[in-house]
Amino acid sequence: MPLFSVVIPSFNRVALLDATLKSVFAQRFTDYEIIVVDDGSTDATMDYLQSLQHRVAIFHQPNQGPGAARNRGARHAGGDYLAFLDSDDLWFPWTLEVYRDVIQKYNDPSFVTGRPYLFSNDDEWKTLNQSTMTESEGFVDSLASGGWRWWSASSFVIRRDVFAAAGGFTDEWVIGEDVDLTLRLGVAHGFVHITAPVTFAYRNHAGSLKHDLTRMYASAQLMIRAEHKGNYPGGGARERARREILTRHTRAVTLLCLGKGLLDEAWSLYRTTFTWNASLGRLKYLAGFPLLVVAAWTRSLLRVNPRSE
């Protein structure tokens, strides 16, 4: 069995997927398999994947979202670790080598997160070199790490047995499934965050799923319900750590919703998480957000009923 199963979900990104797979093929460390799950693409994705013959294991499903697609890939994985990579992101030649070194150093941790390099066009990342030695921080588990130490599912390397025990990603079609999984992995023993070098290139582009606010709002509601029901591990002893993560995510979603005129959704999240933010001392947010809502509401009224000249 390989050390790594590289799991890549893809939907209608055949051009970007080609660059992503080439970045995996270029790895210096080669003990891996690649699993691509086509999540109901209507472009030439399947034709492209079939042209790769035996280099990639290919699975196809109706469009169900990235979480369900990653879970499908994980079910067919044979590696000790699942290394997730989205079809619009890329790896550097040293990426898996760095992950291997960290796994050995920390005696097979449950969960490893890498460091991103953000870019908008290909010229920005192609000239990067591995200029530093590997540096990392180890913790008893991810909730003990003091907060948010990941950047999307492309930063995740998870021991396969731990991933299965946590139930994998949510199968619900939401944006923010990486946050939910991190919370469910919160007390899995052995968490490592890589601080150097960068391990993946995160592409900022208009087609990114992070712009789907409806699904982001749905993910925030999903996680709030899960916390209220006690579905996340750690009990009362780790409550503050969980809510630090939850409120960081929901605060961002409220502001994004507000900026797009989704006032009802923004206000709903604010009210639902009010006591959590208060207990964490987020007073600036709690005091300032209602003023932002009033300002946004006023602007919307002026657009609907502009004063005549």
Image (spheres, helix red, strand yellow):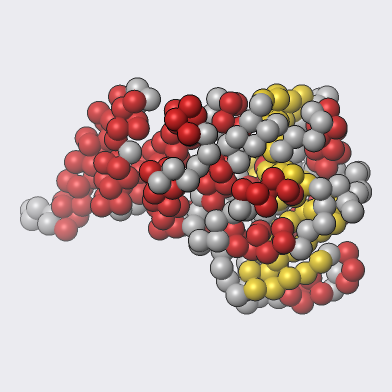
Q: Residue at x 70, y 51 (%)?
A: 85
Can residue 277 be seen? yes
Q: Position of residue 170 (x, y in %)?
A: 55, 56
Q: Residue at x 88, y 64 (%)?
A: 55
Q: How many marks?
A: 0
Q: Residue at x 69, y 73 (%)?
A: 60
- Residue 77 vs 58, above or below: the answer is above
The quadrant where residue 141 appears: top right
Left/right placement of residue 32 relative to residue 203 reads right
| Most foreground residue, 144 or 302 | 144
The quadrant where residue 34 appears: bottom right
Q: Residue at x 30, y 42 (%)?
A: 272
The quadrant where residue 239 appears: top left
Q: Position of residue 188 (x, y in %)?
A: 64, 37
Can residue 117 be seen? no
Q: Position of residue 196 (x, y in %)?
A: 74, 28
Q: Position of residue 147 (x, y in %)?
A: 54, 29
| Most foreground residue, 49 or 124 | 49
| Most foreground residue, 16 or 245 | 245
- Residue 15 vs 234, above or below: the answer is below
Left/right placement of residue 284 relative to residue 77 reads left
